Image (cartoon, rainbow, N blue to C red):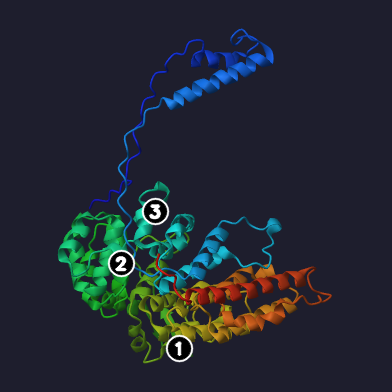
């Protein structure tokens, strides 16, 4: 499909040749003036003069000649003016919020403090994403004067682009077409959604699907899928054979949203795709549908490899990993060649178990619950491999019951947990739980183990943090300060707290922001650093509260 990027709205003016200079009696030519300047007026006198007088005469003659050259230039043809900027029907920002946006965009490019100390002032660059999210929730449009700085910010930070381009709206895209440095906005799908045809407009949808840019086509597929999943699959199937492999992969990945059993036939056909990455993605999506034929085939394979030894004194899980990776396994998405440092058989086993529906295991283990299955000992050192595969399956299938079993109690030391000791895997499992349960589990983990291992877990909690989680983080920071640690050991958590604590938590932090006498065994200067860090945290929370209040104030009057 055509993917030619839009050309600038108007071409640069054509160069107009400089008219030949008209000779003036007694006035040296330009070449003569250049020669005199290069050789010096001592060797090339000007109008018979020497010394300072000759140098002044040379400069006067050059000025006269330059003025005549400029005055004689003929104007070039007028450039074609750009098309008018499209209208943005969204309401304008309240005046206080507009000024706040200007300050955040200006602070984004402010130089870092000298000496590496952040001071007590809030970090405006880290508050800009939150401000954009709040403005987007309220449906405001960007002020026209702020669009250049907003596009510059999005060019510098890819994490800002979806929210910044959505806020910039159609005028932002129009402006991006006039500056090559902002062309990324024309390739990103976030800002194109407002210009898509109505999903019910069959002719418009077909035209954009056949002629649009890749980002527009991805956004169009998502919009049609939200309204009519069957129509989106038909759209994709109609051009599937002619798409590039990398495009097929991105289109297939877009089916994750709203994945259902109705997608199985299309995904099953994609298992025969000529691209290995496309086949692997199709298999992953099918394995997320526990009732799919692929999930059934994977379950049949997995249960032959993992079972229960009832003859042992204590019931034990026994594992017999696959001895080969046959063609049928490869077609179902099993990668035959393991990464460096991994054994083939354990690699194949992990792929089978993570793709098998978790519902197949209770029957395999005599009706035991997920908690009871995870608590069983595993023979021959297969526990880490098996539990890690179950973790990936729980995340893929969004199975909260298995996630709870694999997470275990938050008070249990991470290295001895029932399912996994990897904090990264625990964070993924937590994401399958509802926000309130997730925040409660992490709060209990922080209370039991402190903050040194909690950073990844805090990152998956809903913002703003629920009150129990916020209180647990504040208490843990207070304990770390009393222990005499330096605050930069917790700089990552402090940064998260600035963005994620509820602004109402500021009142609990006021007392911690005061400078307190240092204990004798404390690190030198730690008290001053902690006071500074807490003062910055309090100031940031107050600023976040003002940002929200400004966005909720009376909107600006239309110009």
What is the quadrant of residue 513 in the picture?
Answer: bottom right
Question: Secondary structure beneath disc 2?
Answer: helix
- Residue designated by label 2: 254
Report the residue at 68% width, 13% height from top.
51
Report the residue at 52% width, 60% height from top.
105
Q: Residues within 10 Å of mark 3 (few under 14, many from 20)?
A: some
Q: Tell which of 450 and 131 is nearer to you.
A: 131
Pointer 2 or 1: first along the chain: 2
Please state which of the two labelled residues, at mark 2 or mark 1, is closer to the viewer: 2
Q: Position of residue 449 (x, y in %)?
A: 62, 81
- Residue designated by label 3: 184
Pointer 3 or 1: first along the chain: 3
Q: Determine which of the numbered discs, if any, sits on residue 371 in the image.
A: 1
Whether 259 is drawn above or below 43: the answer is below
Pointer 3 or 2: first along the chain: 3
Q: Residues within 10 Å of mark 1 (few under 14, many from 20)?
A: some
Q: Is residue 381 visible?
A: no
């Amino acid at each position: 499909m055509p993917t030619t990027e839009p050309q600038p709205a108007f071409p640069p003016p054509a160069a107009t040749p400089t008219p030949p200079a008209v000779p003036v009696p007694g006035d040296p030519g330009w070449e003569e003036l250049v020669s005199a300047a290069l050789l010096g007026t001592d060797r090339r006198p000007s109008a018979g003069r020497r010394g300072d007088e000759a140098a002044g005469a040379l400069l006067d003659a050059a000025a006269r000649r330059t003025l005549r050259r400029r005055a004689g230039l003929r104007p070039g043809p007028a450039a074609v003016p750009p098309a008018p900027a499209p209208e943005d029907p969204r309401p304008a920002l309240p005046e206080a919020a507009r000024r706040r946006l200007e300050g955040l965009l200006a602070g984004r490019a402010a130089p870092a403090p000298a000496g590496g100390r952040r001071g007590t002032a809030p970090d405006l660059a880290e508050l800009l994403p939150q401000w954009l999210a709040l403005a987007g929730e309220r449906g405001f449009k960007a002020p026209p004067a702020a669009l250049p700085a907003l596009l510059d910010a999005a060019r510098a930070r890819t994490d800002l682009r979806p929210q910044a381009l959505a806020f910039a709206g159609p005028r932002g895209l129009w402006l991006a077409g006039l500056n090559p440095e902002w062309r990324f906005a024309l390739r990103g799908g976030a800002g194109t959604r407002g210009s898509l045809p109505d999903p019910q407009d069959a002719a418009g949808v077909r035209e954009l699907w056949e002629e649009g840019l890749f980002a527009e086509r991805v956004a169009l597929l998502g919009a049609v899928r939200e309204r009519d999943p069957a129509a989106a699959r038909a759209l994709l199937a109609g051009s599937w054979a002619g798409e590039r492999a990398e495009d097929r992969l991105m289109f297939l990945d877009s089916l994750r949203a709203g994945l259902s059993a109705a997608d199985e036939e299309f995904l099953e056909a994609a298992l025969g795709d000529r691209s290995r990455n496309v086949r692997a993605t199709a298999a992953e999506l099918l394995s997320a549908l526990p009732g799919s034929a692929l999930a059934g085939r994977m379950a049949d394979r997995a249960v032959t490899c993992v079972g229960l030894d009832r003859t042992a004194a204590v019931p034990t899980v026994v594992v017999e990993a696959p001895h080969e990776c046959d063609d049928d396994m490869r077609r179902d998405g099993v990668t035959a060649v393991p990464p460096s440092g991994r054994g083939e058989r354990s690699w194949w086993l992990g792929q089978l178990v993570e793709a098998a529906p978790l519902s197949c295991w209770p029957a395999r283990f005599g009706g035991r619950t997920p908690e009871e299955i995870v608590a069983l000992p595993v023979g021959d050192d297969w526990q880490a491999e098996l539990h890690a595969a179950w973790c990936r399956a729980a995340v893929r299938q969004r199975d909260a019951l298995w996630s709870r079993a694999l997470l275990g109690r938050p008070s249990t030391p991470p290295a001895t947990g029932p399912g996994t000791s990897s904090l990264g895997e625990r964070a993924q499992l937590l994401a399958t739980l509802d926000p309130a349960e997730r925040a409660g589990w992490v709060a209990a983990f922080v209370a039991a183990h402190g903050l040194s291992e909690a950073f990844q877990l805090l990152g998956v909690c809903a913002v703003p943090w629920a009150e129990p989680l916020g209180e647990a983080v504040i208490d843990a920071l207070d304990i770390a300060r009393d222990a005499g640690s330096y605050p930069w050991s917790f700089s990552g958590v402090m940064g998260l707290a600035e963005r994620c604590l509820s602004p109402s938590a500021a009142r609990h932090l006021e007392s911690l922001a005061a400078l307190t006498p240092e204990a004798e065994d404390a690190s030198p200067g730690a008290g001053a650093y902690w006071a500074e860090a807490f003062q910055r945290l309090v100031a940031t929370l107050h600023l976040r509260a003002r940002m929200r209040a400004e966005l909720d104030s009376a909107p600006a009057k239309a110009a």
